[in-house]
Image (spheres, rainbow, N blue to C red):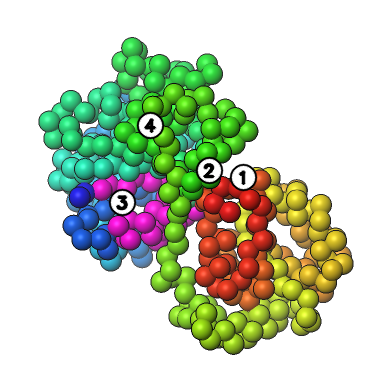
Amino acid sequence: MKVLFAASEALPFAASGGLADVAGSLPAAICQQADMDCRVVMPLYRSIQPKVRNQLTFLTDITVEVGWRKQYCGIYTIQVGKVTYYLLDNPYYFMRDGMYGFYDDCERFVFFSRAVLEILPAIEFYPDILHCNDWQTAMVPVFYEVLYKYHQEYANIRTIFTIHNIQYQGIYGKEVITELMGIPTYHTGLLEFDGMVNLMKGAFETASCITTVSPTYAKEILDPWYSYGLDRALVRRSDPIIGILNGIDVQSYDPETDPQLKKNYSAAKLTGKKDCRKALLEECALPDSNGPVIGIVTRFVAHKGIQLIQQTFQEMLQLGCRFVVLGSGEKLYEDFFQEMQATYPEQVHVTLGFVPDLARRIYAGADMFLMPSQNEPCGLAQMVAMRYGTIPIVRETGGL
Ligand code: GLC
């Protein structure tokens, strides 16, 4: 079976969140199965380093229509293990600092979604399944349904749309339909929702199958609070939303071999974990004592449950807990943790930023891992913590 996995980010090339981990590890896992050929297509961003760029092979270039525009799309390819990656180049759309948050994000990802369908003849790969992920690729099933399924080579393709987070839907003004999408007006109802254009809703209307990243989240998003309003569009589908729990790459995250750790260890031989704990406390200049060391590795945003942490933080400190915190995000929360570090320097250590190596040392060195998200479609950090023998403390939601 042939699968083309379309995502706006994928490791080892570009990452801002859990989607990149899944797009980096799931295709590789699928390719381990007999007779499965899973390939990945993503944008070629500026953040992809020149030394990686130099390893890419230029296949060809094509023209992709974005409304009335005809845009260049270079197709580069690289093999990572068994997985073939296609990186789509358009300097105007993707040679920028950062991946999202631009005034023309809708145009950028309409281009990308259209390009995913347009490259198939050029790469000579007509998948059985076109697997799309989150709002950035939500237009793929819409374009497929409206413009491509009638072509002979495309006729047997089926589309899967996976919701990694329903909070980000891709909501724009109605003008984008004529301006960017070139979709006949009698189809615009597919995309309209609450007086706006909602890309994720378009995928709900058109994908052959909808999945999400945990069985609990599949139920939760039928409730308006969790669905950010989109439950009304989901319940219209006749088939159920399938929740399949994510996994993690257990080879990369392996305390027995992880080169970041002071001492390697395993479930059968745990002694090395004590050395990791000692090394972490030293690195963070926290005194050694018997109280538990609690790790927090997260984006500082409300839905990660930072408010719950704030409300109970002093109490936990009085119980003798120490905290090693790594993350960045809303200033409000960054300030909170920095203030706590200044007030309790012997118990709190904060690093602002995204530091993957330190994250691994925290997973290994902490006794417990705190992740009380208000909602969490799946969550990967709690699985990594368990892999490193560190007990997750979570709120019961989604994958937690
Ligand atoms: C999103 C979700 C997270 C999930 C990840 C991968 O980042 O917020 O819960 O684990 O996608 O599916």
- The answer to whether the residue labelled 2 contacts the one labelled 4, judged by CB atoms less than 8 Å apart, is no
Badge 2: residue crowd in 10 Å (few <14, some 14–19, many ≥20): many
Amino acid at the residue labelled 1: Asn
- The answer to whether the residue labelled 2 contacts the one labelled 1, judged by CB atoms less than 8 Å apart, is yes
Q: Is residue 364 left or right of residue 8?
A: right
Task: Tell me where residue 277 sits by quadrant.
Answer: bottom right
Mark 2 vs mark 4: which is more N-terminal? 2
- The answer to whether the residue labelled 1 contacts the one labelled 3, judged by CB atoms less than 8 Å apart, is no
Horizontal and vertical percent position of residue 190: 39, 20
Mark 4 vs mark 1: which is more N-terminal? 4
Q: Is residue 182 magenta?
A: no
Observer-side mark, 2 or 1, equals 2
Amino acid at the residue labelled 4: Asp
Mark 1 lies on a secondary structure that is loop
Circle 4 residue: 239
Observer-side mark, 3 or 2, equals 2
Amino acid at the residue labelled 2: Tyr
Segment tinted magenta in the rendering: 3-30
